[in-house]
Amino acid sequence: MGRCAEGAVACSGCCACFLCGLIMMIPSLMLSGYLFWIYFRTFTPSISIEMFEVPALNKTSNGAFNIIDPTITFDLRLKNENLNEGVFYDNVNVTLSYYHANISKFSPIGNKARRVESIQSYGVPWDIAKLEVLNGSTTTFRVDVNTRIKIRHLLALFFSVNTQRTTLDVGVNIPVNDQGIKSVKKGLRMSID
């Protein structure tokens, strides 16, 4: 075996060969690290409102708004966007609010803890909300979600690790039109305020 010496040509066992081998391994180590990061990184689940319906604001179903149905129906979508992880939810608390444009303030109108739900709202100024949608505008409701989540990482076929529970508080404003539905066709993704 040769020795490391200044100006020495590469030989087996010398430190120059070791460094060359190490340099050659760096790209594969970087790729392995990137794939490991992709596999184990954690995303917060996405929460969105897919459907939101307020029959009291549908001008075609109840004529001239003579009948007030305070029921609000919504579909809350919880989506796990992690590759190899499970998400466990504590109680999912949903708060509905109505936006008072004249005072720029939201006031709560109902609470629920389920995914697809119809609730009886309270405190909505229906006359004002009807006028807003009849004038070709929209009226705004808000959905806020509060829950605690725990994520399970699957490290091997039969081995997993759970993270500690973390609090998730998200919400979204929902414009409702004169058909009594959200005016945006696609789901409205909730975000942290």
Image: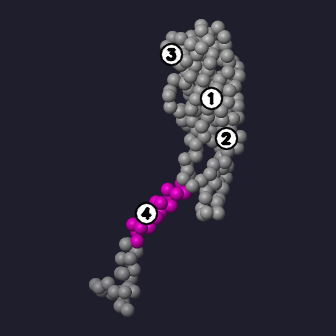
Compared to residue 118, the image places residue 30 above or below, namely below
Please say whether residue 105 is visible from this viewpoint.
no
Q: Secondary structure at mark 2?
A: strand
Please provide the residue range marked out in magenta: 25-41
Q: Secondary structure at mark 3?
A: loop
Residue at position x 58%, y 46% in the image: 80
Residue 3 place in picture, x, y as percent: 36, 89
> Are the residues at dot 4 and dot 3 in contact (C-beta closer than 8 Å)?
no
Residue at position x 61%, y 56% in the image: 153
Residue 21 place in picture, x, y as percent: 38, 76
Between marks 4 and 1, how big is the CA–CA gap? Answer: 44 Å
Query: Circle 4: is it few (<14), some (14-19), or many (20+) Cα within 10 Å?
Result: few
Q: How many marks?
A: 4
> Are the residues at dot 4 and dot 1 in contact (C-beta closer than 8 Å)?
no
> Are the residues at dot 3 and dot 1 in contact (C-beta closer than 8 Å)?
no
Q: Which residue is mark 2?
A: 147
Q: Which residue is mark 1?
A: 74
The circle on residue 31 is 4
Compared to residue 96, the image places residue 150 above or below, namely below
**Circle 4 or circle 1, nearest the eye:** 1
Query: Circle 1: is it few (<14), some (14-19), or many (20+) Cα within 10 Å?
Result: many
**Closer to the camera in the image, 31 or 185:** 185
Give whichever of discs 2 and 3 has the lower sequence position. 3
Between marks 3 and 1, how big is the CA–CA gap? Answer: 21 Å
Tell me where residue 30 sits by quadrant: bottom left
Q: Which residue is mark 3?
A: 137
Magenta stretch: dominant secondary structure: helix
Between marks 2 and 4, how big is the CA–CA gap? Answer: 36 Å
Compared to residue 142, the image places residue 169 above or below, namely below
